[in-house]
Amino acid sequence: MPYQAKPIVRVAVEPEDPRHFAELEAGLQRLYRSDPTVEVHVQETGEHVIVALGELHLERCVKDLTERFAKVPLRVSEPLVGFRETIANGDANYDKLAIFNFKHLHMSDMTTGRTTDGKFKTVVCPTPDCQVTLHLRAMPLPPSVVAFLENHADTWRALQDDSDDSVDVTSVKDELTAVLQGLPDYASASTIFQANTGTPDSDPRAKFESSLITGFQLATTSGPLCDEPVWGVAFVVEDMVLTPTEDAAAIYGPLSGQVISTMKSGCRNAFIQQPVRLVEAMYLCTVQCHAEHLGKLY
């Protein structure tokens, strides 16, 4: 059975003349059709990225793109390294004011509190008109849960598509429950998913669920450390207090938009209350050789 290697070297390409972006995009499509081992896509930052099997393969792809397919001068970046922002267990024993600009992150109006049982520290986040107050906390996900989520990334995307009936939701939930039950502290880990059970339709806070999700997505796409995606972190909404006020929208705008921005800033604030870490990608492989060459390999 032939083995298909996976591309690992990533670089961003752009034309030297911005007017040649159309030629670059057409050339990337031709390169992709001519070489089944190369990957071409556009990142969320707008960069056009080529992913090749190695440095020699990458050089050949760039040469073909420049001379055969796009036929325009190109700028090629250094190899891209994917970083992720995460948190660790324990207390953040450092001066947050010396590291983070709270005014820039829109956190100056936020305070800290405690959960009802006093066990966890929370961040209290009011909207500008003080109609909604969110109580948030961040916690690191167990490695087994992170691995499960990464292995089922396509399944989660399919679950978001109501027209896709190919996913067996029951089997996915059963497998997730089995992963959680294998953890030493099943009760605290299950809180991550209990927070996403939603609220009854009769509850006036239910209409802000989509705003909370949008704010969460904005916060995790670009973290507070260096604007890299957040990885392995759960954000728990401990409470949401709604205090309706008349004519507030005329001054501060729609409440749904305020909830989005407050949720985004609140997740960032809850994130930096924990010991923050920057995660770098590692290349893991297995090397084999004949027994007589083991000494040279070591």
Image (cartoon, helix red, strand yellow):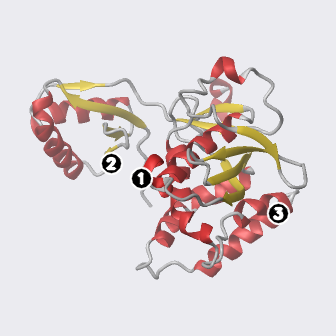
In the picture of the structure, the residue carrying the numbered disc 2 is 37
The quadrant of the image that shows the N terminus is bottom left
Q: Quadrant of residue 3?
A: bottom left
Query: Which mark is in front, 3 or 2?
Result: 3
Circle 1: residue type: Gln
Q: Is residue 61 in view?
A: yes
Q: Is residue 217 in view?
A: no
Query: What kind of element bears circle 3?
Result: loop
Q: Earlier in the sequence, mark 1 or mark 3?
A: 1
66 horizontally vs 112: left or right: left
Q: Which of marks 3 and 2 is nearer the N terminus?
A: 2
Q: Nearer the viewer, residue 130 or 148?
A: 130
Disc 1 to disc 3, how far (Cα)?
34 Å
In the picture of the structure, the residue carrying the numbered disc 3 is 182
The quadrant of the image that shows the C terminus is top right
Vertical comparison of 67 with 41: above or below:
above
Q: Earlier in the sequence, mark 2 or mark 1?
A: 1
